[in-house]
Image (cartoon, rainbow, N blue to C red):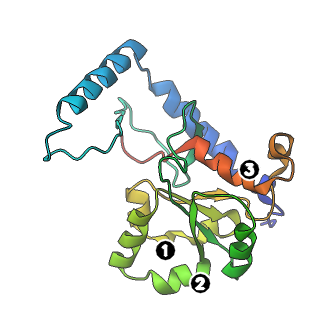
């Protein structure tokens, strides 16, 4: 197999498959916007009516579950990046993200220290991930310590074992990014501003197309 040369080639190869999955799922999903709006308003009214009830924890989020009539024939462990008109991740919302990187991790840590990327709270090298997070309790602690996970695209295919199935089951498998520079197709938007590229990752949500109907 011909080795991939850069991040653009990697995504071009992957996107052909994932775009096919995404189009098939979107084709099966039909949402009545009027009914969705009514449901959200009802949930907001319910939340407001229980704000003084200590038995209910006020998370401030509304969760939408979509059940398909037809189970997808193919599924993907790689999250699909979906832009949000109103982002739900930011420094304002105390978002904490972690990035798994190629070794040595210190090089990437030092680079981030000179950038303004407030939501990136942790950088973990591949070898440290394998060494320090072997047990299920350690993986669980890592999983619930951060809202979003990203990884250097060069180690993406190596993360299934060290990250474990827990990340897949909780729909938090890392999204592959370019840890070297701003990708070519993003340069028109960000130029060489790598911090802007990383901060832009908060403007999306990340959908994992599972092997079931939900």
Residue sitting at x 71%, y 73%: 108
Nearest the eye: 80 or 189: 189
Image mark count: 3
Question: From the viewer's perspective, is the residue at label 2 or at label 3 nearer?
Answer: 3
Q: Is 5 on the left or on the right of 141, as rendered? A: right
Is residue 181 visible from the viewing direction of this image? Answer: yes
Give the quadrant of the C terminus. Answer: top left
Q: Around disc 2, counting alpha carbons within 10 Å, would you say few (fewer than 14), some (14 to 19), or many (20 or more)? A: some
Q: CA distance from mark 2 to mark 1?
A: 12 Å
- The circle drawn on residue 196 is 3
In primary-sequence order, the first of circles 2 and 1 is 2
Q: Position of residue 31 (x, y in %)?
A: 42, 20
Q: Around disc 3, counting alpha carbons within 10 Å, would you say few (fewer than 14), some (14 to 19), or many (20 or more)? A: some
Q: Position of residue 167 (x, y in %)?
A: 43, 62
Q: CA distance from mark 1 to mark 3?
A: 31 Å
- Dot 2 falls on a residue whose secondary structure is helix
Question: From the viewer's perspective, is the residue at label 2 or at label 1 nearer?
Answer: 2
Note whether 43 is above or below 127 in the view shown: above
Note whether 183 is above or below 5 in the view shown: above
- The circle drawn on residue 161 is 1
Q: Which residue is mark 2?
A: 127
Q: Is 129 on the left or on the right of 186, as rendered? A: left
Is residue 103 visible from the viewing direction of this image? Answer: no
In primary-sequence order, the first of circles 2 and 3 is 2
Q: Is 130 on the left or on the right of 170, as rendered? A: right
Residue sitting at x 61%, y 67%: 157
Give the quadrant of the N terminus. Answer: bottom right
- Dot 1 falls on a residue whose secondary structure is helix
Q: Position of residue 123 (x, y in %)?
A: 60, 72
Q: Is 203 on the left or on the right of 9, as rendered? A: left
């Amino acid at each position: 197999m011909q080795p991939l040369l850069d991040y653009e080639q990697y995504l071009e190869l992957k996107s052909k498959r994932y775009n096919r999955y995404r189009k098939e799922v979107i084709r099966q999903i039909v949402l009545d916007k009027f009914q969705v709006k009514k449901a959200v308003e009802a949930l907001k009214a319910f939340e407001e009516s229980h704000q003084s009830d200590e038995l209910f924890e006020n998370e401030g989020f509304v969760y939408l579950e979509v059940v398909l009539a037809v189970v997808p024939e193919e599924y993907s462990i790689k999250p699909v990046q979906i832009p949000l008109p109103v982002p739900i991740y930011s420094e304002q919302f105390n978002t904490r993200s972690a990035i798994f990187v190629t070794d040595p991790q210190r090089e990437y840590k030092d680079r981030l220290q000179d950038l303004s990327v407030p939501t990136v709270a942790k950088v973990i090298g591949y070898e440290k991930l394998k060494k320090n997070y072997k047990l299920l309790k350690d993986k669980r602690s890592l999983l619930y310590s951060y809202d979003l996970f990203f990884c250097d695209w060069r180690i993406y295919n190596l993360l299934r074992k060290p990250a474990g199935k827990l990340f897949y089951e909780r729909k938090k498998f890392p999204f592959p990014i370019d840890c070297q520079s701003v990708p070519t197709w993003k340069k028109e938007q960000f130029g060489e501003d790598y911090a802007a590229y990383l901060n832009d990752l908060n403007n999306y949500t990340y959908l994992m197309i599972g092997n079931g109907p939900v």
